Image (tube, helix red, strand yellow):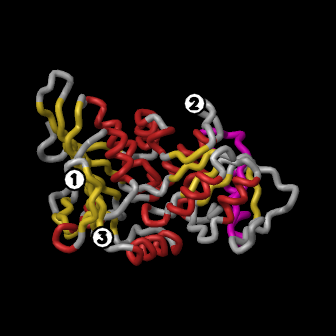
């Protein structure tokens, strides 16, 4: 679903590269666009979907192995379609503010099929990158994520609509402070986000699934995710809009000595390759193409995907880690 959009098209291309014989169905509202994408992939078919219909407008005899929602499905017909047929389901657009219906649907049909809620930043790749960096720690006290989204890299119409919907739902940010998940507003939510070239951008701490995912995966009592929209370092150099996320970790090593790391995850082609990687990693896992079978229930990316494998896949798309001032 949404297979002709930036994230869906990119994820399908990665899945084709990783698994050349995997059958793919590109579903969208425009059959011509869907057929073009399917033709580029090979071993793929195209179909139209109608998100207003409980059967998505798909043929009654259609056979699928999973449903991937690479767009906002406001009626949750894609999820219900998957549950009624016992198919794994992945979504990336609900965000922290909209996951309640997915969680309730998953609880009501706990034994139906696995649901992967991947509405994190770039479909969970930032969480996985942070957890990969966290491996050298014995205890983590503080996690600070700072992301720059270039104003020319907000994605297609679906991505822009997601940002508008999330900002309408809440202007408050969610942080974990001294072990307590806390909503912050006004000056308390404001933050400065430093780009890789040292430029400071005004931002704010936002309500995003990365915060509870990282807090609960590491037991870190202090976690926040600061977000700024503005010109990226790549564009200031006269290049395309770049993807930039700074990951700061503080804690102790296995000898109980204080340590800290400060690193950037950067991609010169912007956020699309990393979002596509996050989706493809989730699909790979849900289909049992890597790792053991996934049990029915609600899952998040860090619960299913090996961070080392994720970082390797990110690097294959051109993502790199660079040091930041204060890295030790």
Q: Could you classify mark 2 by the number of other residues whose Cα lies within 10 Å: few (under 14), some (14-19), or many (20 or more)?
A: few
The percent coordinates of residue 159 (x first, y second) are: 48, 69
Q: In the image, 211: left or right of 288?
A: left
Q: What's the mark number on residue 291? A: 2
Q: Residue at x 66, y 46 (%)?
A: 113
Front one among 7 and 128 = 128
- In the picture as drawn, the residue positioned furthest to the right comes out as 61
Q: What's the mark number on residue 264? A: none
Front one among 182 and 28 = 182
Q: Which residue is mark 3?
A: 172
Q: Nearer the viewer, mark 2 or mark 3?
A: 3
- Sequence-wise, the earlier of marks 3 and 1 is 3
Q: Secondary structure at mark 3?
A: loop
When the figure is inspected, residue 3 is found, relative to residue 282, above or below; the finding is below
- Give the quarter of the figure containing the C terminus: top left
Q: Which residues are magenta?
A: 16-41
Q: CA distance from mark 2 to mark 1?
A: 34 Å
Front one among 63 and 276 = 63
- Give the quarter of the figure containing the N terminus: bottom right
When the figure is inspected, residue 133 is found, relative to residue 298, above or below; the finding is above
- In the picture as drawn, the residue positioned furthest to the front comes out as 108
Confirm whether residue 48 shows in the render. Answer: no
Q: Residue at x 26, y 63 (%)?
A: 205
Q: Residue at x 61, y 57 (%)?
A: 105
The percent coordinates of residue 175 (x first, y second) are: 27, 57
Q: Could you classify mark 1 by the number of other residues whose Cα lies within 10 Å: few (under 14), some (14-19), or many (20 or more)?
A: some
Q: CA distance from mark 3 to mark 1?
A: 15 Å
When the figure is inspected, residue 98 is found, relative to residue 109, above or below; the finding is below
Q: CA distance from mark 2 to mark 3?
A: 38 Å
Q: Which residue is mark 1?
A: 177
- In the picture as drawn, the residue positioned furthest to the top comes out as 255
């Amino acid at each position: 679903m949404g297979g002709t959009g930036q994230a869906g098209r990119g994820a399908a291309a990665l899945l084709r590269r990783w698994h050349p014989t995997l059958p793919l169905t590109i579903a969208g509202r425009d059959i011509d666009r869907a057929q073009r994408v399917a033709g580029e992939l090979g071993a793929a078919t195209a179909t139209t979907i109608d998100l207003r219909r409980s059967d998505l407008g798909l043929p009654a005899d259609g056979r699928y192995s999973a449903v991937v929602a690479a767009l906002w499905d406001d009626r949750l017909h894609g999820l219900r379609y998957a549950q009624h047929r016992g198919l794994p389901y992945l979504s990336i657009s609900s965000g922290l503010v909209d996951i309640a219906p997915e969680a309730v649907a998953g609880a009501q049909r706990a034994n139906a099929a696995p649901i992967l809620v991947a509405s994190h930043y770039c479909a969970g790749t930032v969480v996985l990158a942070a957890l990969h960096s966290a491996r050298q720690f014995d205890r983590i006290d503080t996690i600070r994520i700072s992301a720059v989204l270039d104003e020319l890299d907000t994605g297609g119409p679906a991505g822009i609509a997601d940002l508008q919907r999330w900002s309408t739902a809440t202007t408050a940010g969610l942080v974990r402070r001294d072990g307590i998940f806390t909503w912050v507003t006004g000056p308390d939510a404001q933050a400065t986000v430093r780009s890789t070239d040292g430029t400071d951008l005004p931002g704010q701490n936002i309500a995003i699934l990365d915060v509870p995912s990282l807090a609960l995966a590491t037991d870190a009592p202090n976690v926040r995710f600061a977000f700024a929209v503005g010109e990226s370092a790549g564009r200031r150099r006269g290049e395309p809009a770049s993807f930039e996320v700074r990951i700061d970790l503080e804690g102790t090593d296995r000898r109980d000595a204080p340590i800290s790391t400060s690193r950037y995850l950067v991609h010169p082609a912007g956020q699309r390759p990393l979002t596509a990687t996050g989706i493809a990693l989730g699909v790979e896992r849900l289909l049992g193409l890597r790792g053991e079978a996934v049990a029915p229930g609600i899952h998040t990316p860090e619960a299913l995907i090996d961070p080392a494998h994720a970082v390797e896949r990110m690097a294959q798309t051109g993502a790199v880690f660079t040091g930041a001032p204060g890295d030790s």
